[in-house]
Amino acid sequence: MAMTFPPAADAQSTTDLTPSQDSSAIRRMADNILTEGKAYINLKTLCKGAPARLSGSANAAKGVELVRQMLIDAGADTVYLQPCLVPHWVRGEKEEADLTVAGGKKILLNACALGNSIGTAPGGVSAPVIEVRSFDELDRLGKKVIAGKIVFFDYPMKQTFVNTFQAYSDAVVYRVQGPSKAARYGAVGVVIRSLSTIPSDFPHTGTTVYDSTLPKIPALALSTNDADKLSNYLRMRMVTRLHIKTGCKMLPDVPSFNVIGELRGSQHPEEIVTVGGHLDSWDLAEGAQDDGAGVVQSIEVIRALKASGITPLRTVRAVLFMNEENGERGGTAYADSAAKDGNQYIFGLESDNGGFTPRGFSIHATREQFVHFTAWRQLFEPYGVYQWQIGGAGADVEPLIGVKSVVGELVPDSQRYFDYHHAANDLFEAVNRRELLLGAVNMTALIYLVSTYGI
Amino acid sequence: MAMTFPPAADAQSTTDLTPSQDSSAIRRMADNILTEGKAYINLKTLCKGAPARLSGSANAAKGVELVRQMLIDAGADTVYLQPCLVPHWVRGEKEEADLTVAGGKKILLNACALGNSIGTAPGGVSAPVIEVRSFDELDRLGKKVIAGKIVFFDYPMKQTFVNTFQAYSDAVVYRVQGPSKAARYGAVGVVIRSLSTIPSDFPHTGTTVYDSTLPKIPALALSTNDADKLSNYLRMRMVTRLHIKTGCKMLPDVPSFNVIGELRGSQHPEEIVTVGGHLDSWDLAEGAQDDGAGVVQSIEVIRALKASGITPLRTVRAVLFMNEENGERGGTAYADSAAKDGNQYIFGLESDNGGFTPRGFSIHATREQFVHFTAWRQLFEPYGVYQWQIGGAGADVEPLIGVKSVVGELVPDSQRYFDYHHAANDLFEAVNRRELLLGAVNMTALIYLVSTYGI
């Protein structure tokens, strides 16, 4: 690129503001975030100071302390912890997966246990392996073929979905339900192809859910490269056995917390506008894209309002939820409290789709309510948000539907998310500063508008 | 992120197609690109096989051969080279910049010569340095202060521009005009703060243009981190001298080529629809984002049309332009030929803003012509393109305005572009496969529509 510049819809502080006060206020907050924003440095502090914040772990507790301090530093009026009991699953000792091929050669595979998986016996499980590409195929094969084997669910995320979350949605059933579906036919273990859109050596973990009426069998994810490898050896009929080993186990529930910071509304303090991300992460990495990004963006909303001298008319509350990944206990605890505290919960926004460049918002609302949002759309276009859709919301704010709240989520660009999701490369360094801050800009703008006008 | 999915505007091949034939054709090509696309592997071949493709270099010539073969492999009917004479600037031996501070300590700075800069004397230039933040300030200081010194233009790219190309546009004058402006007042050298939006140790090169009526003085870029360092030492009044050294020089022009591949139109072969990127790059890296991405995306347009069994009604021509970076001789040669060959050049599209996720198109057209484009907008939303603007076009297709062509450019997300632009980290690894391919999808769709309907 040399020197041509599309005159994009952009606005530099002092030049082409629209006359409206809202657009001026948003521009002021945006400038503040893009120049003085703390989200990126907070993300570094969180990721390096408390990586692997799996619910119930010491690092999750450390994360609670770190973000509590960040909310105080951001200028929240009140900062407090909201208790919740969380599951305490631990991965245990070193995990192994290896293949024995014709001639006796052993081939190591990159693998990790799925979250909530039981452990194997100390020596692991060794059995013949069968590749299965769908639940239909599993049902056709039935007990005769499946019993005594390890089932390899080899269902790739489809590249043809432009929105990678749709590809995830399409493929994730094998991770969530695969182990119990295979156990029904007598399988002794499950491995799945990692849910990733790239060829990679990192296995991707994530929750599996056991059907309580069926035997629990251990379940691991193979890296996409090693899923290819296993598939190739199977096609060549060279595989004799697959051996998997993991020491993971579920311990008793432990007390933990959501971390909450508020700016009290000056006119309608009883109307609550929630913005959040989840503080817990999987245990393999730093939980940067998932969901350190959403955590620090939510804190940034508080900081930017305060730093820009804006006292919201309705109460703005940043909530850093615990246990989104394997239980959603934090989100549930927050909604339970909301049902009882006498306040009105008018809106809940979550950022839990990565700290990538923002593209839009998804809002779970009636068509009538949604019109309020799209009426604001021009205020967002200078900051790169063009897509507004009635749709889903973040998992932690979704329970607020029970108290009649409108809920929603930030929709960042999805192309790179599954390069990192639940894998060991989800590190601080995977997040781009400007992309992260621009997400915070748009979240701040939306929270400002809802806290000013209601819904 | 666990398990909620916004039902974004997306379409999986077999499910929710609109009835229109265009949307089906585009879906077919998109699926082909996202699953069978060659752009990413071609980018690797180009970047690793012919990095540092600066005009006139042996690697630029190697690049010509590589992309010629790629066009043949893509299925172009005709592949040919279009000659042009290009400047031949070389960086020469190892470059140096170092600071002597109070007490005599020497501090090395990361620096590189600006493109087209003259070299220093063999021992370099050593002089006092003065920090200048604007041309106004330079004028105020005048000859008395500037003469005999090295001028340090310390003008950062402003973070508050959401579109980073606007920040570039705002700051690039110091790189382009700074050396001659300083020479007017007797400066003996210039260093500038690199044009980047991130703190980094990589200096960013790029063209400077000498005013032929003034003495030529050597000009270098400092990495943004080292610009900070120099600025800090100057603020502390600790700097005694700056020493800069570079052996770069301008050699005589050499013959080179644009590389062209066509699919001949079945109904209006004389109407030409051009799509391109530039094959040359700066010499410090692999020219992946700038502009290997645009090169392989343009080749992908040809491949995807061919692989999808589409014979365009008008001629589609992929042009890989030489010498965009420091002369635009390739773009000029193409337009000169267009003015004489009797064909009608109806549209020229360039991709030269990086291989990032596509956001929109900028079209240089009358409002009447522009309506044709926006009538197609819904066909693009499933592929993430929402922004259509009347505006600039790529530097290589811009000269086609002279033959009454509508011209335009792909507008990808701009947040990460200046992390890499013209610096040693612009490597193949900086490009994300899905982002690159999705750009090619949208380019292919637009070229398909223009080649089918004209303008």
Image: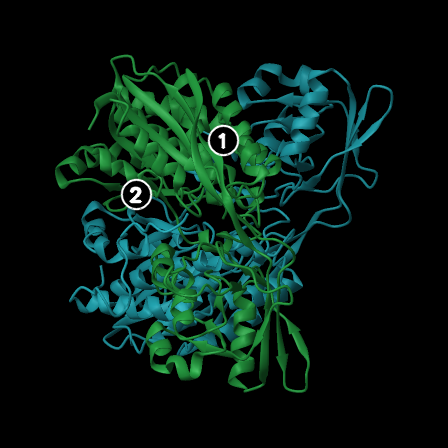
Chain colours: A green, B cyan
Based on the displayed image, in which of its 4 quarters is residue A342 positioned?
Answer: top left
| Letter of the chain that mark 2 sits on in the rendering | A
Left or right of residue A135, residue A288 in this image: right
Q: How far across and how far down the image is residue A100, in percent? A: 63, 79
| Precedes in sequence: disc 2 or disc 1 | 1
In the displayed structure, A410 sits above or below B29; it is above
Do circles 2 and 1 both sit on a common chain?
yes
Badge 2, how many Cα within 10 Å: few under 14, some, many 20+?
Answer: many
Q: How far across and how far down the image is residue B400, in percent? A: 36, 55
In the displayed structure, B296 sits above or below A85; it is below
Tell me if I can see residue A67 in this picture.
yes
Q: Label 2: which residue?
A: A393
Is label 1 in a helix, a strand or a loop? helix
User: In the rendered image, which quarter contains the C terminus of chain A?
Assistant: top left
Nearest to the eye among marks 2 and 1: give it. 2
Is label 2 in a helix, a strand or a loop? loop
Based on the displayed image, in which of its 4 quarters is residue B440 positioned?
Answer: bottom left
| Pick the front one: B437 or B54 | B437
Q: How far across and how far down the image is residue A446, in percent? A: 30, 30
**Figure disc tally:** 2
Q: How far across and how far down the image is residue B108, in percent? A: 78, 34
Q: Amino acid at mark 2?
A: Ala
Tell me if I can see residue B166 in this picture.
no
Q: Label 1: which residue?
A: A39
In the displayed structure, B221 sits above or below A123; it is above
| Letter of the chain that mark 1 sits on in the rendering | A
